[in-house]
Image: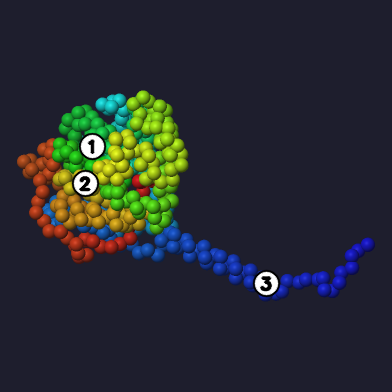
Amino acid sequence: MSALVEPGDVHTIAPEMPAMFDGVKLAAVATVLYFLVRCLNLKSPTAPPDITYRDTPLNRYLLKSCPILTEEYEPPLLWGKSGHLQTALYGKMGRVSSPNPCGVRKYLLMQDGATATFDLFESLGDHRTGDDITMVICPGIGNHSEKHYIRTFVNHSQRQGYRCAVLNHLGSLPNIELTSPRMFTYGCTWEFAAMVGSIKRAFPQTLLIVVGFSLGGNIVCKFLGENRINQERVLCCVSVCQGYSALRAQKTFLQWDQCRRLYNFLMADSMKKIILSHRGSLFGMNSSKMEDADLSRLYTATSLMQIDDNIMRKFHGHDSLKEYYEKESCVHYIHNINVPLLLVNSSDDPLVHRSLLTIPRTLAEKKQNVIFPLTWMDKVIVGYANAICQWERHRPPCLRTRRGPCPQADGKAYRTRAHVCRMDTHTPRDKTGMP
């Protein structure tokens, strides 16, 4: 039998319902578009880089010969104005596609039994000056020569006539075992010094361009500032997107502004994986300074500071996290650098808080050999290096770099918009993947 349907049981959709659904869809689309515009920073205007420098003949020459230092950067439309997307995309894919430069791996036995490694890449042609120039490169935290951004930069530099030597941070290569209970730390310069010494011995006539990315920027600046001898045969130094003071950066890394707390967690997770991959060497050797309790605390760590306090500081016997950060930060050594120094940072870097940028800006205002720009990365480095080499080539023989630091010249600090100094702008950060 068929069921009887009462008139009250029949329900119809009111004609205004479809219009209401369309309104909800439009609101959802509008909301998504709004957040995309905000997250991608699409409304941010482009402008020339923010530069701080002193008025010296060298700096005037560099700004004239390296126009990319002052040119307005036009970023890719969809992702080029977002520091977060640049960090992710450039770290994973390189600038456009990741080349595969061919190099030779070198092994160096350290005094404490550790084995440092670096990869050597010969130039793909003569340098424009005809000189023998080697870029000695220190990557970011836990990075090595096989990372996409390093391969991209090395390939670009090779094509400009530079030999490249890239340090592989101790413990960062998954297929290279540690030979001592120690791995890389925030400011240890031992492995980088060993690589530089090896290059100087292998190529007695070469001059050096020192380059450091993020954590590597801290290491190279600390290395040059630790001893004036380290500046011999160095034409210039370029530091890219470092934070200068770990102690001052510590508090900012716990803030959710620009998602730094999230980045902190992700980098801590990566560090845990590196440490645990060498657990036998770091915790099992008789000379190890680690205890079982340190390993337990490592498993529960959710920030770099916790890992630094429980693990990293103990590699060099620091009594506290504060002491570790104080002694391993380049902020206490960078003022000793007398070779030309380019300090590159970005205004939209999600990792380096803007308060930390007072360090390089103040240094550039006081020292004649320093230029501090907020601008793009790899092309700036090579352009600056080319200009330095050309400057050196045309100097009188008695004034050329003779295996030592450059003399300083008098000059005034420029801080005006008309002189391309201190212009507050949006500029993209370099994409080193990790700091």
Which is nearer the N-term, disc 3 or disc 2? 3
Callout 3 amino acid: Met
Q: Nearer the viewer, residue 215 or 383?
A: 215
Question: Circle 1 sits on which residue?
Answer: 134
Question: Circle 3 sits on which residue?
Answer: 17
Question: In the drawing, what numbered circle is on residue 175?
Answer: none
Callout 2 amino acid: His
| Foreground: disc 1 or disc 2 | 2
Residue 410 image position (x, y, % from top left): 9, 54
Which is nearer the N-term, disc 3 or disc 1? 3
Callout 1 amino acid: Thr
| Foreground: disc 3 or disc 2 | 2
Q: CA distance from mark 3 to mark 2?
A: 68 Å
Question: Circle 2 sits on which residue?
Answer: 332
Tell me if I can see residue 414 in this picture. yes
Q: CA distance from mark 3 to mark 1?
A: 71 Å
* 156, above or below 422, in the image: above
Q: Residues within 10 Å of mark 2 (few under 14, many from 20)?
A: some
Check contact, mark 1 vs mark 2: CB within 8 A: no
Q: Nearer the viewer, residue 306 or 230?
A: 306
Residue 83 image position (x, y, % from top left): 38, 55
Q: CA distance from mark 1 to mark 2?
A: 27 Å
- In which quadrant of the rendered image does the N terminus lie? bottom right
Residue 306 image position (x, y, % from top left): 39, 44
Q: Nearer the viewer, residue 12 or 75?
A: 12
